[in-house]
Image: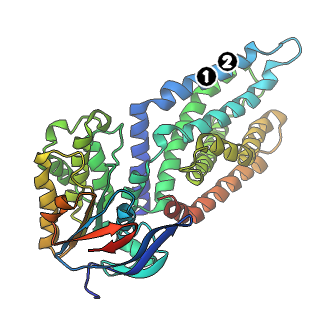
């Protein structure tokens, strides 16, 4: 079985488990939608333009709930399950790619639901073309999924994992948030989207290389 | 020595300053079934993990299925090793059928064979039941079905009978018989030496990480 076939089997496994457990669709997604809705309620609209808050709230919600998607319990493998995969000869990088891929798909779903809600509640100025928004969401989700999966692997077995993993992800996700926000803002400002998109691509490539380099030793160390 | 399924020479394993295995020397010849008995905490599970190439020895040397432990070559023989431990390792939200089909896909085994193996362990009727809704005994049988399906050359069973009723005994016997017949080997570990005596050719005792008859 080749690398991509292994990754696909792992990704399908995670998506099937999510379909049964419903952690993203039943818990994370509704709370993300509520988070988008709560900010206008808590904002003094006489002094702050909601339109100016729309995209920042969107990226903040995407970052926080995106981390929850990648670090959800149903995505956690037990030591025995990891041993089974090792003994089956599954490439640790393929396993990483499958898990991050599944997380990215789920993040894209969450961001696709919260985006129209954000537009509805905040009415931001200068909406980007759908193709640009979709491209940014894919790059952002892929990067965040890789980062959170990596953080999950680094903290596997640690007692403080649920607290430590998000603390690792948040600062390292800054290039993803900045690149995504700038790419979307550039439409309203009439500036080039090339720079922010390049930042996103470079961040994603850097994370992919980190995963390739660390997947094997991390798997051996945590089995 | 070179033809042994498992050949450990003075193998030791230390983790976080704690010595778990001390100077283990043992050979498992083709077709042989070895029992390792010992009390809780003796290092039995760690010994199986070393033999399964999942842990590299910190001292000594050894080969498993011809591959030298602690080298990249050891990873190549992993698909020929079948390990069953205390935890069956099923995915709670997947059905029994989905669990075994997942392993089948990753091992390149036809899904039909996976279903057949589930039937062989008497779980065809529960194939569509989620693992979390099955008893521990049923989950253990799925784990044994995994080994039947994968047909490993080296079988490693850690407390194989724990949580299983008498109807599961023939499954374990079938796994062991297959290993004997194909020139592979098996190591069974248990805290109860009397359980091992009937299935194994010889029983070693492991106490405080050291072997002694």
Q: Quadrant of the N terminus of chain A?
A: bottom left
Residue at (59, 23) in percent of width and height: A31
User: What element does badge 1 sit on?
Assistant: helix
Answer yes or no: is residue A163 visible. Answer: yes
The chain to which mark 1 is attached is A
In-front residue for pair B5/A14: B5
Cα distance in 3D space between marks 2 and 1? 6 Å
Q: Mark 1 = which residue? A: A33
In-front residue for pair B73/A39: B73
Residue A165 lies in quadrant: top right
Residue A128: image location, x then y, percent: 71, 33
Q: Residues within 10 Å of mark 1 (few under 14, many from 20)?
A: some
Q: Is residue B87 left or right of residue B193?
A: right
Tell me, for residue A37, which label it has, or none: 2
Residue B49 lies in quadrant: bottom left
Q: Is residue B17 left or right of residue B71?
A: right
Residue at (66, 22) in percent of width and height: A35
Answer yes or no: is residue A197 visible. Answer: no
Tally of numbered discs: 2
Q: How crowded is mark 2: few (under 14 residues within 10 Å), some or many (20 or more)?
A: some
Above or below, comparing residue A97 to residue B205 in the picture: above
In-front residue for pair B187/A87: B187
Residue at (61, 22) in percent of width and height: A33
User: What element does badge 2 sit on?
Assistant: helix
Residue at (56, 22) in percent of width and height: A30
Q: Is residue B72 left or right of residue A54?
A: left
Tell me, for residue B120, which label it has, or none: none
Residue B18: image location, x then y, percent: 52, 65
Q: Is residue A19 left or right of residue A141?
A: left
Residue B15: image location, x then y, percent: 52, 65
Label 1 near label 2: C-beta < 8 Å? yes
């Amino acid at each position: 079985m080749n690398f991509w076939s292994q990754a696909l089997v792992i990704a399908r496994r995670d998506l099937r488990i999510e379909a049964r457990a419903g952690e993203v669709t039943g818990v994370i997604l509704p709370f993300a939608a509520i988070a988008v809705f709560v900010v206008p309620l808590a904002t003094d609209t006489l002094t702050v333009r909601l339109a100016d808050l729309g995209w920042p709230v969107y990226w903040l919600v995407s970052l926080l709930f995106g981390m929850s998607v990648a670090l959800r319990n149903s995505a956690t493998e037990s030591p025995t399950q990891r041993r089974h995969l090792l003994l089956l000869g599954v490439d640790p990088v393929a396993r990483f790619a499958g898990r991050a891929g599944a997380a990215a798909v789920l993040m894209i779903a969450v961001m696709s639901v919260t985006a129209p809600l954000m537009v509805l509640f905040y009415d931001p100025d200068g909406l980007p073309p759908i193709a640009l928004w979709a491209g940014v969401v894919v790059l952002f989700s892929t990067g965040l999924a890789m980062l959170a999966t990596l953080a999950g692997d680094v903290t596997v077995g640690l007692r403080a994992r649920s607290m430590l993993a998000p603390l690792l992800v948040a600062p390292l996700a800054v290039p993803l948030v900045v690149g995504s926000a700038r790419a979307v803002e550039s439409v309203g400002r009439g500036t080039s989207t090339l720079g922010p998109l390049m930042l996103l691509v470079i961040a994603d490539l850097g994370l992919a290389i980190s995963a390739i380099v660390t997947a094997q030793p991390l798997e051996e160390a945590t089995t | 020595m070179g033809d042994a399924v498992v050949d450990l020479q003075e193998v030791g394993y230390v983790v976080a300053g704690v010595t778990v295995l001390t100077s283990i020397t043992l050979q498992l010849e083709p077709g042989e079934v070895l029992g390792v008995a010992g009390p809780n905490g003796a290092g039995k599970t760690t010994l199986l993990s070393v033999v399964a190439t999942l842990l590299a020895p910190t001292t000594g040397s050894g080969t498993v299925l011809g591959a030298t432990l602690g080298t990249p070559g050891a990873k190549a023989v992993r698909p020929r090793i079948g390990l069953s431990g205390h935890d069956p390792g099923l995915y709670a939200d997947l059905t029994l059928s989905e669990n075994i089909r997942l392993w089948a896909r990753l091992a390149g085994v036809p899904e039909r064979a996976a279903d057949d193996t589930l039937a062989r362990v008497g779980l065809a009727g529960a194939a569509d039941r989620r693992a979390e809704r099955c008893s521990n005994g049923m989950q253990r049988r799925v784990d044994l079905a995994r080994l039947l399906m994968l047909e490993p050359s080296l079988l490693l069973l850690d407390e194989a009978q724990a949580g299983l009723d008498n109807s599961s005994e023939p499954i374990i016997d079938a796994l062991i018989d297959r290993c004997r017949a194909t020139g592979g080997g098996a190591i069974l570990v248990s805290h109860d030496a009397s359980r091992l005596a009937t299935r194994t050719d010889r029983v070693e005792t492991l106490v405080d990480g050291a072997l002694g008859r």
